[in-house]
């Protein structure tokens, strides 16, 4: 059991947590603290003196502090700590409510997972709750919860329930997280690897294992302040397969740090054949999804109103020569059934195929309305080997793809190094066919003399199913970050996941030009030979590869692009 007690009493209660007893926080010692003393945090240590209260935004707060003030999840009145497990053992609780019938799952405020290194965690049958009225907050206690790297066939899985928040964010008022693992709290984005309350890390095992999976009919949940790295497939896998009735609604995925994944950064919704459930009311925001082997984010089965905004995605498709299958080399992929999905104020870096792929998904029985579509506006799209945008409606009608007010730069065609039959597209935005309605307006682009496929030059005119207006070809500066760990003018197409052969290009040996950067087992290396020969493994080939400092990954944009991506944080 866990009570919020001052001083040494808190330590005694924390040591008793392994018995799994639930006790109302109201039973805690409520004697007054000395004047000016902060309330204790989850580990019994005093909270910082600058902690906010009751979700109020502190004066002058910006970025994370303004968006996510301390106390926004309320103060807990009842808490429950899951029983500790033996060292090296996983936590397997497929039915929480059956396993712990003494818990009032309708009113429990905090579900604590004891700190430790687990091969896996599986929590099932979470309660159905109202996240707006009284969420169930699942968080770490007593330090960091680390999952993975110990050879298990899955990592962190949550199944069922609604109205829950999985949070690795340190908040001394709401009693979540741990002060020693603050992540990017207070806008401290640089060098935050390993500093989140939840860390899912599978040590770069090319195993096909995803990091965090949420399914089993789960809906209406929130995921925040989770670091996922080194996993063998997707960082997040959010879906319930083969169940059309398991609609996922009102999901908020924000402030996560996903990096160096073998495949997708985020895999949201199914890409498989029907029956599949829809995603409705998703908000994906303020995430860093960096150095994904294939797509940074893939969204499928979209319906209702959804938003993807203020994220940094990329560089993406860094494993384009050796990915698990062909054509998994875009950055953003959207498959929409109905409704409106807005993609805005993001930074997209890197793609080997189409940077943005937009696809209709025609499912019998879906209702459609005028205005349905995908709106991609006010984004930065930089560094791509083929198309910037490809869209096709695939018999969904009405459906309009709107591409507006974006900056598009950094095209360099070399896709034929792997796909030998590939040819330069000759434009940046492609309408899949005349039955696909497109609006392209207010975009600025460089590195080419034609923006879109059906209308020449700057794409200001009309064609079948296509309207273009106010687009401009102009020289554009590269985006600059506060401390990405790479120069502002770095060509993100020259950063790849090291491979000795291009398995998708007939197993051709891969050499690297001098100055290129590769990732190998999560660490960056710069090529210092001319070229770096095929088969020279970076960590044992100092004559070819120079180790670099770990990237700081503070990818908050500066200057003219400061409103994009993470903004102030």
Image (tube, helix red, strand yellow):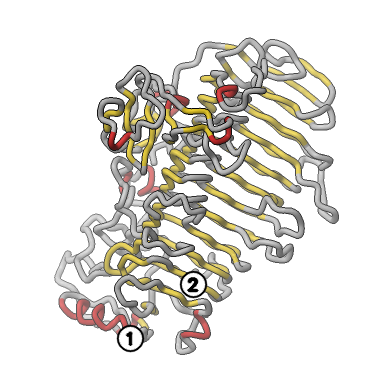
Residue 176 sits above or below residue 84 on the image = above
Determine whether the residue tagged by mark 1 lies in a helix, strand or loop: helix
Q: Which residue is mark 1?
A: 19
- Mark 2 neighbour density, 10 Å: few (under 14) some (14–19) many (20 or more): some
Residue 522 seen in the figure: yes
Residue 190 place in picture, x, y as percent = 30, 40
Determine whether the residue tagged by mark 2 lies in a helix, strand or loop: strand
Q: Which mark is residue 123?
A: 2
Identify the image quadrant of residue 323. Answer: top right
- Mark 1 neighbour density, 10 Å: few (under 14) some (14–19) many (20 or more): few
Identify the image quadrant of residue 434. Answer: top right
Camera-nearest residue between 244 and 284:
244
Identify the image quadrant of residue 142. Answer: bottom left
Residue 287 place in picture, x, y as percent = 46, 45
Residue 43 place in picture, x, y as percent = 24, 69
Residue drawn at the location 58% of the way across and 34% of the way down: 504
């Amino acid at each position: 059991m866990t009570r919020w007690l001052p001083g040494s009493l808190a330590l005694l209660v924390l040591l008793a947590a392994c018995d799994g007893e639930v006790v109302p926080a109201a039973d805690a010692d409520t004697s007054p603290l000395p004047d000016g003393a902060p309330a204790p945090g989850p580990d019994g240590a005093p909270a910082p003196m600058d902690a906010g209260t009751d979700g109020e935004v502190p004066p002058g707060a910006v970025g994370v502090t303004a968006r996510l003030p301390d106390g926004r999840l309320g103060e807990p009145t009842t808490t429950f700590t899951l029983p500790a497990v033996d060292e090296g053992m996983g936590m397997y609780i497929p039915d929480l409510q059956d396993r712990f019938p003494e818990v009032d799952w309708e009113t429990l405020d905090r579900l604590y997972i004891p700190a430790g290194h687990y091969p896996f965690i599986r929590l099932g049958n979470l309660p159905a709750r109202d996240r707006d009225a009284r969420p169930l907050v699942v968080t770490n206690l007593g330090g960091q919860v680390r999952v993975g790297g110990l050879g298990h066939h899955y990592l962190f899985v949550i199944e069922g329930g609604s109205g829950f928040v999985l949070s690795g964010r340190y908040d001394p008022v709401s009693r979540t997280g741990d002060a020693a693992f603050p992540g990017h709290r207070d806008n401290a984005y640089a060098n935050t690897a390993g500093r989140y309350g939840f860390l899912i890390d599978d040590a770069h095992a090319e195993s096909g294992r995803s990091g965090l999976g949420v399914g089993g009919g789960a809906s209406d949940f929130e995921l925040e302040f989770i670091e996922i790295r080194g996993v063998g497939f997707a960082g997040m896998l959010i879906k319930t397969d083969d169940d059309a009735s398991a609609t996922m609604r009102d999901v908020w995925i924000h402030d996560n740090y996903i990096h160096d994944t073998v495949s997708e950064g985020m895999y949201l919704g199914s890409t498989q054949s029907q029956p599949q459930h829809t995603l409705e009311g998703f908000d994906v925001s303020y995430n860093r999804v960096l150095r994904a082997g294939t797509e940074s984010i893939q969204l499928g089965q979209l319906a209702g109103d959804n938003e993807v905004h203020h994220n940094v995605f990329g560089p993406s498709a860094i494993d384009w020569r050796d990915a698990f299958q062909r054509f998994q080399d875009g950055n953003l992929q959207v498959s929409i059934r109905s409704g409106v999905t807005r993609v805005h104020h993001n930074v997209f870096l890197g793609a080997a195929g189409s940077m943005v792929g937009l696809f209709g998904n025609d499912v019998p029985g879906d209702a459609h309305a005028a205005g349905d579509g995908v709106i991609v506006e006010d984004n930065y799209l930089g560094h791509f080997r083929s198309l910037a945008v490809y869209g096709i409606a695939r018999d969904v009608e009405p459906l309009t793809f709107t591409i507006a007010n974006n900056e598009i730069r950094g095209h360099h065609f070399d896709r034929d190094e792997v796909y030998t039959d590939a040819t330069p597209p000759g434009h940046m935005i492609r309408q899949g066919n005349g039955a696909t309605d497109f609006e392209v307006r207010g975009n600025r682009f460089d590195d080419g003399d034609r923006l879109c496929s059906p209308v020449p030059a700057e794409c200001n005119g009309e064609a079948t199913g296509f309207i273009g207006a106010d687009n401009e070809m102009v020289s554009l500066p590269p985006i600059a970050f506060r401390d990405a760990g790479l120069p502002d003018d770095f060509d993100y197409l020259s950063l790849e996941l090291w491979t000795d052969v291009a398995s998708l290009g007939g197993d051709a040996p891969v050499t690297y030009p001098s100055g290129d950067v590769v990732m190998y087992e999560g660490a960056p290396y710069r090529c210092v030979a001319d070229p770096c020969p095929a088969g020279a493994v970076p960590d044992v080939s100092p004559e070819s590869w120079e180790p670099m400092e770990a990237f700081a990954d503070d990818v908050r944009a500066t200057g003219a692009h400061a409103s994009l991506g993470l903004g102030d944080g």
